[in-house]
Image (spheres, grey):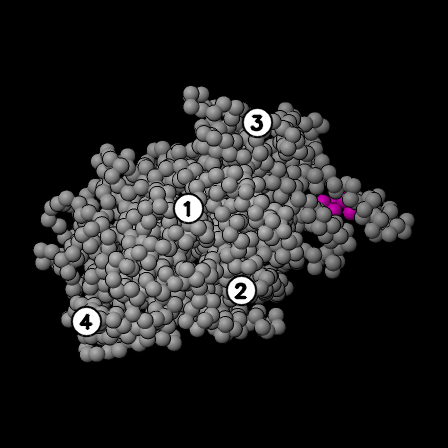
């Protein structure tokens, strides 16, 4: 048989990377990551209106999260008499005033549930993406810069991690790790959050490593890197002083997209009942608690409000991530 | 019956002016039963472990299936005064001797198992021995305790078995029903332990089909299919052979709203539920004439908070228990999570039970935050702890978790510090067995005879080892005495007096914080008849206890 | 006369012969035999197209993934048999621990797991009684796999059926308001989680208006109408996110292709727009579509799991969910292993397909 060239698979990987750049998809979580408009490829100098709206929502969300304890809203455990399952914007005489988003089944104010839910969901989201970026970013940087055997090993390891669909991996890590984490931490309340953050962080690592590596590969071939090496600078120094600063902007974009993915993943895991323990809310477990009231038709607003929060946040993160990418991503500008 | 509290539990019995009927009265004449049709029954859960009866812990869904495939030796019937008596069913007669230490069971002649083998004394002995834990290949972890006081089971002749008991056992016939779990199993099924949980061979009105594939008509999470048994031994009161329907298909539908929608949409023609909100829904449909609805909290189970009284738990101290009892308000739980339907329970026994106390006479703590705070102070003084703090365990079922959260907020209002933990159903059972909890939401104790509750609260087993199904590790000499005396007291009036002490002990000690009686709603399409089971072969009228609703008499108009 | 060699057999014979063999084994011998032969055939194809190195890579992945699956149970603190067979005697628990290789060194446990896994011997354990008698995991999979495959297949078909025309339209009308509108819609749909869409559809179409059942599954054999009715909402929920991806990819691909010379030439030759779009512009995009489909497979699987739970479809996702609830750790490990392997092989299959389709390979023959 004639020698089959290696190119088909390598070609497919490159195409895959190229495609992934156009439409990066976080395989296995059931969540597509947003992509960039290919024909708007030339880096825009300004962020459009949409991006500013997205920023506004995210800033509002962050402020609400940080200031939650001092905001004039109820505690997330507080039950208000007569508020049980109250519809949003309820005007009738028997409605409790001052709760525009209504109440959940136990009579807790939906606004406070959503705000404290945001705290937990975003904590998990940002926490796990941070783990992913730090660990995955470092691995990718290392692999992309050093190449050779280290590169092969790291890429192989990342490939293996990517071979298990991410939701399955996240679920199994959560289930099997939770008890150990609880042992180590010795505190039940935070164990759930920590386990989820770790599990989702671990599954974020391979994708982030791959993207960092792809970006590092490109930047490492630039003249100033060759020059630095010629001057005898040590590898680590070059990596961190020359290459990393250029890679970071595109990492920022990916980070935003990754947070969106993780928020949805946490919600998926909570809907399956494997999320953090109630009464601590996350958007996911608010949906989990509220499904019965949706299918019975009694109080669908519980699920819809939490879903809207997730959707708006993910939409904003995706939009912003895209916009930042369009501005900074190396590949798009055709380097 | 072991069942961690599932979301949704009972309500008041009928008599509230709606169309539902109580199950202790047969309905008015429904006409002459017609043959044919397939029952499609929506169950509240799948029975993942299958039906190897001696070893299984069947919950409500599993018991429904068992009732179609198997028959029990005795069955509960109305005693004519609103209470329960046990009459022979698969057995022709079940007779004790004068001292209640020898029970002679004679089975009906000519009854065949689904595989054609005869129901005889050997088969009965084989089944009972398996339930006693005497069968080395089939484990019976729970029933070994239940039947601990059986000394031996002996074959007398081809159709007669004699059970010898270690102590006079007055209500032994109640245990031969065992909430529908003690069905007679064919020797062939027990002889193949590997397939015992799904190759089901009983004497019941329906038999499984399709055993070419290993699963024999049971596709887990999908359906359990059984066809009518053409050789079923039982006839109805007019001499017509049962069952009327051609086949039955059990479908597990965990989400109750989806189960109700399945009924309305025609995919299911009978369902059961304990969810108060959905029961309210169903009442509206019944009033509009769209469905048939029967509700029952007769001989109901109780939903409650079980406390661990062993040394390692704060609830070993009576003040801690009383503090939580005074802080809690089950009525709020009932109103918020069950649409207000179930009846508040102040004791584990429902009104039909001989052990039932008039609530006026019982001093079970009612909500009183001041008293709760007092008890907390007393607890702190007793133990030197700075705080009364504990964890409440529940399943991950959203309905149950709501109940836990309400309890938490009530307890915290009184000044306790409460953490919630949600774990999977099987883990709850294992945790309860290990006694590794502090407070857990639970549901158990269906009615019938109070002797059947022995195994849950007696402090030790025969060998003197601790009783591990006494999850709360209750070691109360009064309770032990009540059960020992009650089991063997032959005078009915005296016996009732003995058992009546039990709720008083619980009210004083607050070992368990009773919540409410489970209200079961059985809803069916409007052409379905025979939800209330047919007259028993002995001529008595049946009763439906807790969730056990026989499908044998269902027919389609 | 030249010696006949394997090279002379027409290409189409190989896949057909393999297909027949696999199907035969699957139906008449055992599903596992069929799957193993399928796996071997795939590997052979990989050798042919990509060389031995790639095969070694794949084997390494398989080894690591199954190793990871088998080690999950060791992460649990305490004794897993307490969860698996809580009611059993200490002797029985010791026996099961031994069986599972928990007392042995890691590689022995792994070997045991592999053996059980590939012979279909991994079991559910009955927490109520004896350790033996638990059902084999593969038995339940037999009825569950078709359901999951149906869900994923319908979703992909739906996605492509909608994405192709919309993507082509958007490409053709690139830059217009229609195009911008479609892009915005696609972007929004990408950001909509599948379970959110599922709940919206359930509320609107099942609870408020009785058009579809809120949950449940009817087999195809039982009633074709009911089967599709029960699959509509789940498939749509799964498909919508995919529609957005495929549509955007197709659009961007086609825009580039439409600018190429051969298109201008075709237009000059007077070919109709439709012909140009469908025959000439679409073909180069098939590679990227294929690639995306492969990358997407993981998303499909994840989505299938959660939608099966929401809609109570008795597929492998629901089995996984129940294994979690019933603490059936061994079954859970098996599912993780199976899903991961299926994913690996699907990707390998796409690789092979890619090579087959790549014109450079075909022209080299």
Residue C173, relative to residue A133: is it above or below? above
The circle on residue C175 is 3
- Residue B496 quadrant: bottom left
- What secondary structure is marked by label 4? strand
Which label sits in the foreground, 2 or 3? Answer: 2
Chain name for mark 3: C
User: Residue drawn at (41%, 46%), measured in percent from left and top?
Assistant: B364
How many labels sit on residues?
A: 4
Please name the residue that numbered disc 2 is placed on: C80
Q: Residues within 10 Å of mark 3 (few under 14, many from 20)?
A: few
Q: Is residue A218 magenta?
A: yes
- Viewer can see residue A235: yes
Q: Is residue A111 magenta?
A: no
- Viewer can see residue A12: no
Please name the residue that numbered disc 4 is placed on: B106
C-alpha span from label 1 to label 4:
44 Å
């Amino acid at each position: 048989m004639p020698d089959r060239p290696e190119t088909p698979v390598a070609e497919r990987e490159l195409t895959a990377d190229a495609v992934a750049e156009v439409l990066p998809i976080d395989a296995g979580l059931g969540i597509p990551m947003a992509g960039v408009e290919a024909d708007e490829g030339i880096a825009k100098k300004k962020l459009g209106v949409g991006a500013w709206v997205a920023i506004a929502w995210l800033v509002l969300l962050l402020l609400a999260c940080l200031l939650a304890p001092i905001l004039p809203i109820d505690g997330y455990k507080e039950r208000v008499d007569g508020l049980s399952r109250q519809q949003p914007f309820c005007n009738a005489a028997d409605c409790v005033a001052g709760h525009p988003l209504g109440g959940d089944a136990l009579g807790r104010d939906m606004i406070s549930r959503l705000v404290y839910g945001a705290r937990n969901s975003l904590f998990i989201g940002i926490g796990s993406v941070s783990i992913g970026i730090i660990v995955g970013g470092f691995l990718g940087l290392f692999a992309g810069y050093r190449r050779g055997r280290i590169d092969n090993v790291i890429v192989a390891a990342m490939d293996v991690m990517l071979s298990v669909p991410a939701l399955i991996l996240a679920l199994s890590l959560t289930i099997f790790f939770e008890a150990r984490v609880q042992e180590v931490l010795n505190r039940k309340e935070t164990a759930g959050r920590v386990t989820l953050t770790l599990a989702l962080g671990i599954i974020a690592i391979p994708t982030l490593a791959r993207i960092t590596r792809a970006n590092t590969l490109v930047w490492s071939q630039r003249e100033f890197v060759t020059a630095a090496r010629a001057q005898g600078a040590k590898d680590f120094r070059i990596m961190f002083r020359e290459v990393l600063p250029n890679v970071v902007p595109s990492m920022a974009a990916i980070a935003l997209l990754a947070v969106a993915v993780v928020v949805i993943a946490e919600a998926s895991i909570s809907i399956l009942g494997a999320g953090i323990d109630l009464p601590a809310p996350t958007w996911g477990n608010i949906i989990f608690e509220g499904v019965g009231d949706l299918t019975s038709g009694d109080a669908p607003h519980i699920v819809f409000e939490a879903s809207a929060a997730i959707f708006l946040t993910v939409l904003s993160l995706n939009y912003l991530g895209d916009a930042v990418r369009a501005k900074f991503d190396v590949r798009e500008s055709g380097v | 019956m072991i069942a961690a509290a599932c979301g949704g539990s009972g309500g008041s019995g009928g008599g509230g002016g709606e169309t539902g009927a109580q199950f202790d009265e047969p309905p008015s004449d429904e006409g002459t039963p017609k043959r044919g049709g397939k029952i499609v029954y929506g169950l509240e859960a799948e029975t993942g472990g299958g039906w190897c009866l001696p070893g299984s812990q069947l919950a409500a869904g599993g018991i429904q299936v068992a009732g179609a495939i198997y028959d029990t030796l005795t069955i509960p019937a109305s005693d004519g005064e609103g209470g329960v008596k046990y009459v022979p069913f698969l057995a022709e007669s079940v007779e004790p001797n004068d001292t209640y230490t020898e029970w002679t069971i004679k089975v009906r002649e000519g009854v065949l198992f689904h595989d054609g083998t005869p129901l005889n004394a050997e088969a009965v002995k084989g089944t009972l021995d398996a339930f006693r834990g005497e069968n080395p290949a089939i484990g019976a972890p729970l029933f070994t305790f239940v039947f601990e006081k059986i000394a031996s089971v002996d074959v007398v002749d081809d159709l007669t078995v004699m059970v010898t008991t270690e102590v006079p056992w007055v209500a032994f016939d109640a245990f031969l029903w065992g909430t529908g779990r003690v069905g007679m199993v064919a020797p062939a099924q027990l002889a193949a332990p590997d397939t015992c949980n799904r190759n089901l061979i009983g004497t019941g009105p329906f038999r499984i089909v399709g055993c070419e594939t290993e699963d024999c008509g049971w596709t887990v999470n999908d359906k359990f299919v059984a066809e009518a048994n053409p050789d079923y031994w039982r006839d109805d009161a007019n001499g017509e052979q049962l069952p009327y329907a051609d086949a039955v298909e059990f479908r597990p539908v965990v989400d109750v709203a989806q189960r109700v929608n399945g009924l309305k949409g025609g995919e299911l023609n009978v369902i059961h539920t304990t969810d108060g909100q959905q029961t309210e829904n169903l009442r509206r449909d019944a009033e509009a004439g769209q469905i048939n609805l029967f509700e029952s909290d007769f001989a109901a189970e109780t939903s409650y908070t079980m406390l661990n009284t062993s040394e390692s738990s704060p609830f070993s101290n009576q003040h801690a228990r009383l503090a939580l009892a005074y802080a809690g308000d089950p009525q709020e739980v009932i109103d918020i999570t069950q649409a207000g339907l179930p009846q508040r329970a102040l004791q584990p026994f429902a009104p039909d039970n001989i052990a039932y106390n008039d609530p006026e006479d019982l001093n079970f703590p009612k909500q009183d935050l001041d008293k709760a705070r007092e008890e907390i102070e007393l607890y702190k003084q007793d133990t030197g702890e700075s705080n009364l703090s504990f964890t409440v365990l529940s399943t991950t079922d959203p309905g149950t978790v709501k109940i836990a959260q309400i309890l938490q907020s009530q307890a915290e209002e009184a000044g306790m510090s409460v953490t919630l933990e949600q774990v999977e159903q099987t883990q709850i059972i294992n945790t309860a067995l290990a006694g590794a909890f502090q407070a857990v939401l639970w549901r158990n104790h269906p009615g019938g005879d109070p002797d059947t509750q022995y195994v849950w609260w007696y402090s030790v087993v025969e060998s003197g080892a601790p009783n591990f199904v006494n999850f709360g590790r209750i070691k109360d000499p009064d309770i032990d005495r009540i059960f020992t005396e009650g089991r063997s007291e032959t005078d009915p009036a005296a016996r009732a007096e003995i058992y009546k002490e039990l709720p008083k002990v619980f009210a004083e000690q607050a070992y368990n914080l009773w919540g409410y009686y489970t209200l079961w709603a059985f809803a069916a399409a409007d052409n379905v008849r025979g939800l209330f089971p047919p007259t028993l072969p002995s001529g008595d009228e049946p009763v439906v206890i807790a969730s056990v609703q026989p499908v044998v008499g269902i027919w389609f108009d | 006369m030249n010696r006949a060699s394997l090279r002379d057999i027409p290409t189409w014979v190989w896949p057909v012969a393999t297909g027949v063999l696999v199907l035969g084994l699957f139906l008449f011998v055992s599903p596992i035999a069929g799957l193993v032969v399928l796996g071997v055939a795939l590997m052979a194809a990989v050798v042919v197209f990509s060389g031995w190195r790639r095969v070694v890579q794949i084997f390494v992945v398989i080894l690591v993934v199954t190793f990871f699956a088998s080690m999950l149970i060791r992460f649990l603190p305490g004794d897993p048999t307490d969860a698996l067979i809580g009611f059993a005697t200490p002797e029985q628990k010791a026996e099961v621990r031994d069986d599972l290789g928990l007392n042995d060194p890691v590689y022995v446990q792994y070997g045991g797991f592999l053996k059980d896994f590939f012979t279909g011997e991994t079991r559910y354990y009955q927490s109520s009684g004896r350790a033996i008698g638990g059902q084999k995991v593969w038995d339940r999979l037999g009825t569950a796999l078709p359901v999951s495959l149906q869900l994923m297949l319908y979703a992909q078909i739906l996605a492509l059926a909608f994405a192709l025309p919309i993507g082509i339209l958007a490409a053709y009308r690139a830059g217009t308001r229609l195009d911008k509108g479609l892009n915005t819609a696609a972007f929004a749909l990408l950001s909509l989680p599948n379970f959110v869409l599922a709940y919206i559809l359930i509320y609107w179409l099942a609870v408020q208006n009785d058009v579809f059942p809120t949950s449940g599954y009817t087999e195809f054999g039982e009633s074709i109408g009911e089967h599709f009715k029960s699959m509509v909402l789940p498939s749509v929920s799964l498909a919508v996110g995919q529609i957005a991806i495929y549509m955007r990819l197709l659009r961007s691909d086609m825009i580039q292709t439409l600018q190429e010379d051969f298109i201008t030439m075709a237009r000059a030759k007077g070919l109709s727009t439709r012909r140009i779009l469908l025959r000439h512009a679409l073909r180069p995009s098939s590679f990227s579509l294929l690639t995306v489909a492969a990358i997407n497979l993981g998303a499909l699987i994840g989505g299938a799991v959660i939608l099966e739970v929401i809609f109570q479809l008795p597929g492998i996702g629901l089995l996984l969910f129940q294994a979690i609830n019933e603490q059936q750790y061994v079954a859970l490990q098996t599912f993780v292993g199976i899903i991961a392997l299926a994913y690996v092989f699907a990707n390998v299959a796409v690789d092979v397909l890619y090579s087959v389709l790549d014109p450079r390979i075909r022209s080299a023959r």
